Image (cartoon, helix red, strand yellow):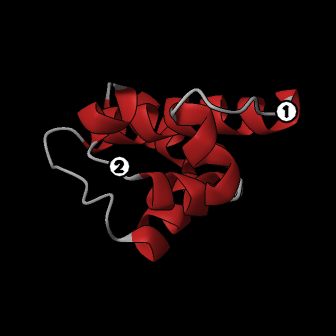
Amino acid sequence: MQLARLGVSQAQLSAYCGVNINKISPWLAATRDISNLDLEKIISTIENLFRLEAAAEPWPIDFRNVPRVKALLERLKAGEFDEKRAAQG
């Protein structure tokens, strides 16, 4: 449901979190378990996508543009957007 809310496909999630889509797809279909490490990567990535979306408000983010979003995620992880939000408010 969270992927649908963000408009992120399984392939895009795979690219963002580094977990192979061959692991993600069966896990989402509830036909195979996933390792705790991969699960942590997926959860962290989804949380960061939501944080990125909130930081960009009111402008929408096109999550289909994987290279740009990956660059934005790296900047988010580095705290760059937190510093800008603190300066604004």
The three-letter amino acid code for the residue at tag 2 is Val
Mark 2 lies on a secondary structure that is: loop
State yes or no: discs 2 and 1 in contact (Cβ < 8 Å): no
Where residue 8 is drawn, which disc sits there? 2
Q: Position of residue 63 (x, y in %)?
A: 33, 58
Q: Residue at x 44, y 69 (%)?
A: 66
Where residue 35 is drawn, which disc sits there? 1
Crowd rating for badge 2 (residues with CA inside 10 Å; few <14, some 14–19, many 20+) = some
**Quarter of the image where one finds residue 38:** top right
Q: Is residue 79 visible?
A: no
> Considering the image in quadrants, where does the C terminus appear?
top left
Mark 1 lies on a secondary structure that is: loop
Crowd rating for badge 1 (residues with CA inside 10 Å; few <14, some 14–19, many 20+) = few
Which label's residue is closer to the chain start, 2 or 1?
A: 2
> Considering the image in quadrants, where does the N terminus appear?
top left
Where residue 82 is drawn, which disc sits there? none
Q: Position of residue 25 (x, y in %)?
A: 55, 46
Q: Is residue 51 above or below residue 14?
A: above
Q: Residue at x 66, y 57 (%)?
A: 22
Q: Residue at x 52, y 29 (%)?
A: 47
**Relative side of 23 to 53, left or right:** right
The three-letter amino acid code for the residue at tag 1 is Ser
**Quarter of the image where one finds residue 37:** top right
**Quarter of the image where one finds residue 18:** bottom right
Q: Residue at x 44, y 32 (%)?
A: 51
Q: Nearer the viewer, mark 2 or mark 1?
A: 1
